[in-house]
Amino acid sequence: MSDDVFAEARPPADRSTPLEWRRAFNTVYLEVEHLTAETLFEVNEIDLLAGPRPSDADQQARGPAVRPAQRSRRRVRGVASQEKVRDRILRTVAAGGESGVFHLRSLPSAIEVTIDGSPPLTEASRGRASDYSAGSFHGILVHAEVPGEEERWALQVCIPTEQMDQLFRGVNAHEVGLVTLGVALHSFSDEVDDALREWHYPRDLFVHGGTAQAPCVQLIAKKAAAPVPAVEVSELTEADDVAPPQPQLPEPRLDYSPLLRSIRTAMWCLFAVEFLRLLK
């Protein structure tokens, strides 16, 4: 198969053709947290190919191994957790004893992300990445596995310098606490899954060879959510275990109006009887 197609190693007997995974730019969204704004100051550049003691002929042809290069650049670094990614990103691992057969292994839980300000690619720099045209901004996902150390994946994406300055100021002023990166990861996906899967369903993508092109197609800067204040709940004491106050009802009041009317009627009756007695 070609470098852009993987085939199923051991298809079942009831299928005539193996399944295929094809490479394309698949966009995945990463939530980048723990942002820090960094400024890099450089004073010299070193020719790493010069060797410890170059010969006189090589030295004259190549020039000095250390040259002045006074410049500064800004970058923003953070960490993207795979637990917050909808799609699962895997990598290939060579199967022992079988040439050309690979297993798939999950990436570490965290990916180190660097957002760098850079000028766009020129025709000369575009030659190193044929999938980019002049004026594009490149990106790359790199795998690093050092014996005795934890496996690491680093993602670097470049954005225009004016956008970098705006993002740098927001992170430095604590106005931006979260970045969502839409990365076009040059990865392999299942042909059947691509044909039948709904767009909002998660999918499995894998990269091969330890590196993958990963240009940033979208960057969303967000303000960090304010933490919810915690409330301490103390244990209830006997004084706290009381019934809530009840609403005060108006006190009952007696109505004396019928009694007063009876007394008045009786007095009029006595007055009438006494008046009749005097007339006799």
Image (cartoon, rainbow, N blue to C red):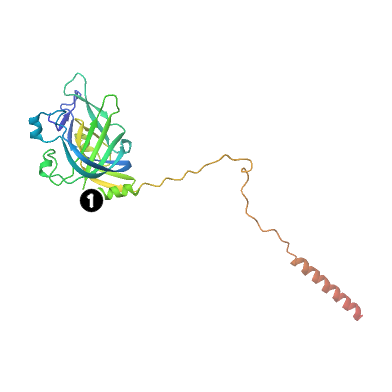
Amino acid on which disc 1 is placed: Glu
Tell me the residue at 31%/49% (across/down): 170
Q: Position of residue 254 (x, y in %)?
A: 73, 62
Tell me the residue at 28%/29% (across/down): 151
Image quadrant in which the N terminus is located: top left
Camera-nearest residue between 10 and 146: 146
Residue 270 in view in this figure: yes
Kindly give the residue lying farthest to the bottom in the view shown. Answer: 279
Q: Which residue is mark 1?
A: 162
Camera-nearest residue between 250 and 131: 131
Q: Residues within 10 Å of mark 1 (few under 14, many from 20)?
A: few
Secondary structure beneath dot 1 equals helix
Residue 123: image quadrant is: top left
Q: Position of residue 26 (x, y in %)?
A: 21, 39
Classify 198 as above or below 97.
below
Residue 183 in view in this figure: no
Q: Position of residue 222 (x, y in %)?
A: 32, 48
Camera-nearest residue between 74 and 44: 44
